[in-house]
Image: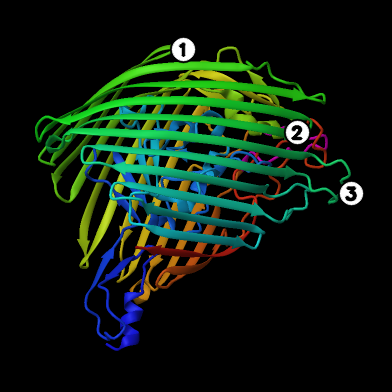
């Protein structure tokens, strides 16, 4: 092997998901390679050692796409969908087990986050390059982090300051005019003390109206965020703290000077949302018995979110302050028995004001909403030689608004043989709704917002089963997983878009809502450095809006997903493909226009999306080129009544698919470590 070949191999960094090459240092005069260790890193790992049905999405998987933020991190994941809530503001929501993301508990490093006021746009508040990994748990999760998880739990782990000193840079641009830059670095100040800084900035330079309805296809977003965190790692005591600030200016609506039916828009309908968000946290852990994993931990966090929004003739001011504290005790009494117990408290203070200068009605809002929720839990784990793992938990919480909540949860993992795993789960979940704070994007339509008198906290049950196995097929491992989940609500806050085509009605649906989800997934490496995954999911979500059980609108019944990843030349190149086919679904009930036609079709058809990315890796950096929605499919008219946005028929809620066609992007990543 000559000198060029040696340096070529030493400098290879499998930054796009293949692995990492490590080599011993060599002086310039050495011309032979001393040692190379190649370690493959899987992008998605099923966490077989846990009782829950959990997956770990690593940074390798996140780099298979542009992944500008958390909302774009699930492109290759068959379980989690991210869909638009409306066609005017770009609000997005996660869907897990066929239900809204409000039933998924969002955590950042095991601290509840992105709740309430942050729900409509929170998926854009966490930059992709900041994330070290994402843990996705389906079904009712552990009682440790609270009572809110019903369909699942998503925990985001940020880059850690206590890791090896490093500097990471990322830049992104697409042909629609979006620019983004990220920087992160950490420094070890001493053997025990370290700090890290993460920076993010993005700016949309252009406005597009591809369907000619005078409304911007996507909002123009300018965002800046910064996070500083510290860590002190002692022998028996560990301390972490961090603070984050975010500013976002989101502008959308009609494009001034554009034309509609030959007439220039002189008095455009404008949407503007300005957000300031501040977060802070501390995590403390004392290990009193390391041999038996005995520790006591204290977590404290505080968040303040402020929004000033304008929706045409409406102005909406929203503020939310949240305090959270958790004291936890854990100890493993024997190899088979362990116990976890803890106390927690959560405080939410929401202030809101809605004013309309036009004829649009304004719902009667509570200007101030306060809720204290102290609680406690106990959780027991039985581990029988890794063959059987049982975790049972019970927590009690008391809401100052709604009263007592008892939350039982159960998880079991059984491995009768090494090649087969069965997971079972069951549990209850609660949620306190803040209706307009979580759904203020509805103000971008002329629909009257009606809040029924019977709104109360949401209460539901979830049960599920997952079977997974791996088989040797032609000398390679075939992984198969099948799962089924059932969710039923005793009380659910329901948005009714059917009963009145000019109203959005929020009410409590008692026992008239349920969800069945079935999914099967297979992964197989057909040849060296190549991985292929195929999945199918059936979602049957129904609710009773007063006319019997019907499909929940704007929800695809089926989804097919295929992903392929190829890393030839020992990872110098990385090619990734994701093909998704979203099935047909029901639209909210249409109404008849004066000419006798329907306002929209009763159902939407299935549609495909195709994403591609190619990455070239070098020693400390990589460049990537990709495209999203390369099938070019987009919803032709997601905004109804766009020709008269100040009229009664203006409606931006009828969105079920992409609102822009094919998009091409490019970027680079730079990474240097000690």
Is residue 39 magenta-colored? no
Q: Going from the N terminus, do you reach mark 3 or mark 2 first?
A: 3
Q: CA distance from mark 1 to mark 3?
A: 52 Å
- Tell me the quarter of the picture where residue 380 sits: top left
Q: On screen, 553 above or below 69?
A: above
Residue farthest along the bottom direction in this orientation: 2
Main secondary structure type of the part rendered in magenta? loop
Q: Which residue is mark 1?
A: 402
Q: Nearer the viewer, residue 181 or 72?
A: 181
Rendered residue at 58%/24% (across/down): 435
Q: In the visual, does 185 lie left or right of 320?
A: left
Q: Secondary structure at mark 2?
A: loop
Q: Which residue is mark 3?
A: 264
Q: CA distance from mark 3 to mark 2?
A: 28 Å
Q: On screen, 572 above or below 650?
A: below
Which range of residues does the magenta coloring cover?
590-603
Q: Which residue is mark 2?
A: 592
Q: Which mark is residue 276?
A: none
Q: On screen, 44 above or below 448?
A: below
Mark 2 Cα shell of 10 Å, populated few (<14), some (14-19), many (≥20): few
Q: Quadrant of the N terminus?
A: bottom left
Asked if the residue under mark 3 is in contact with the one under mark 1, i.e. CB atoms within 8 Å, the reply is: no
């Amino acid at each position: 092997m000559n000198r060029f070949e040696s340096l070529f191999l030493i400098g290879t960094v499998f930054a796009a998901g293949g692995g990492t090459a490590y080599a011993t240092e060599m002086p310039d005069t050495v011309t032979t390679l001393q040692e190379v260790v190649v370690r493959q890193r899987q992008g998605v790992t099923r966490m077989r050692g846990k009782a829950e049905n959990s997956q770990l999405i690593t940074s390798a998987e996140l780099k298979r796409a542009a992944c500008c933020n958390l909302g774009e991190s699930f492109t290759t994941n068959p379980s989690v969908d991210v869909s638009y809530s409306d066609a005017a503001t770009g609000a997005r929501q996660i869907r897990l087990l066929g239900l809204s993301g409000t039933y998924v508990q969002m955590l950042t490093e095991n601290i509840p986050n992105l709740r309430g006021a942050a729900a409509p746009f929170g998926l854009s508040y966490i930059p992709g390059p900041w994330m070290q990994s994402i843990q996705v748990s389906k079904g009712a999760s552990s009682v440790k982090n609270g009572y809110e998880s019903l369909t699942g739990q998503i925990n985001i782990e940020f880059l850690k300051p206590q890791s090896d000193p490093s500097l990471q840079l990322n830049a992104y641009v697409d042909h629609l005019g979006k620019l983004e830059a990220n920087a992160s670095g950490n420094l070890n100040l001493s053997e025990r003390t370290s700090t890290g800084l993460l920076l993010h900035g993005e700016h949309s330079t252009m406005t597009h109206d591809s369907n000619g309805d005078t409304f911007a296809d996507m909002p123009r977003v300018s965002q800046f965020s910064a996070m500083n965190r510290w860590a002190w790692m002692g022998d028996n005591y560990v301390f972490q703290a961090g603070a984050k600030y975010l500013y976002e200016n989101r502008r959308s609506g009609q494009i001034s000077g554009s034309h509609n039916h030959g007439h220039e828009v002189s008095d455009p309908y404008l949407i503007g949302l300005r957000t300031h968000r501040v977060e802070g946290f501390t995590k403390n852990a004392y290990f009193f018995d390391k041999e038996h994993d005995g520790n006591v931990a204290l977590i404290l966090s505080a968040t303040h979110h402020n929004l000033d929004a304008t929706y045409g003739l409406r102005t909406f001011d929203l503020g939310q302050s949240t305090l959270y504290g958790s004291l936890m005790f854990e100890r493993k009494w024997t190899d088979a028995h362990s116990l976890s117990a803890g106390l927690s408290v959560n405080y939410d203070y929401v202030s809101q004001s809605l004013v309309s200068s036009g004829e649009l009605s304004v719902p009667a809002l509570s200007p101030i909403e306060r809720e204290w929720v102290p609680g406690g839990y106990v959780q027991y784990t039985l581990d029988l030689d890794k063959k059987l793992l049982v975790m049972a938990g019970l927590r009690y919480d008391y809401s100052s608004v709604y009263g007592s909540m008892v939350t039982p949860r159960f998880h079991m993992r059984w491995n009768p043989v090494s090649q087969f795993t069965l997971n079972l789960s069951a549990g209850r979940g609660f949620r306190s709704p803040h209706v307009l704070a979580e759904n203020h994007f509805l103000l971008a339509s002329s629909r009257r917002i009606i809040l029924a008198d019977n709104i109360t906290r949401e209460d539901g049950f979830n049960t599920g089963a997952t079977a997974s196995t791996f088989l040797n097929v032609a000398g390679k491992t075939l992984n198969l997983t099948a799962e089924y989940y059932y969710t039923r609500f005793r009380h659910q806050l329901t948005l009714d878009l059917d009963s009145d085509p000019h109203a959005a009605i929020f009410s409590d649906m008692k026992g008239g809502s349920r969800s069945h989800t079935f999914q099967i997934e297979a992964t197989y490496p057909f040849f060296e450095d190549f991985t292929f995954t195929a999945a199918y999911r059936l979602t049957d979500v129904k609710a009773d809006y007063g006319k019997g059980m019907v499909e929940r609108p704007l929800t695809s019944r089926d989804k097919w997903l295929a992903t392929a990843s190829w890393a030839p030349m020992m990872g110098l190149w990385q090619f990734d493909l994701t093909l998704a086919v979203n099935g047909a679904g029901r639209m909210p009930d249409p109404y008849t226009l004066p000419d006798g036609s329907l306002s929209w079709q009763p159902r939407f058809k299935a549609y495909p999306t195709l994403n591609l990315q190619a990455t070239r890796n070098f020693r400390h950096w990589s460049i990537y080129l990709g495209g999203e929605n390369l099938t070019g499919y987009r919803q032709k008219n997601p905004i109804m009544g766009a020709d008269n946005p100040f009229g009664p028929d203006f409606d931006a809620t009828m969105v079920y698919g992409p609102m822009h066609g094919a998009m091409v992007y490019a970027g680079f990543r730079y990474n240097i470590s000690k």
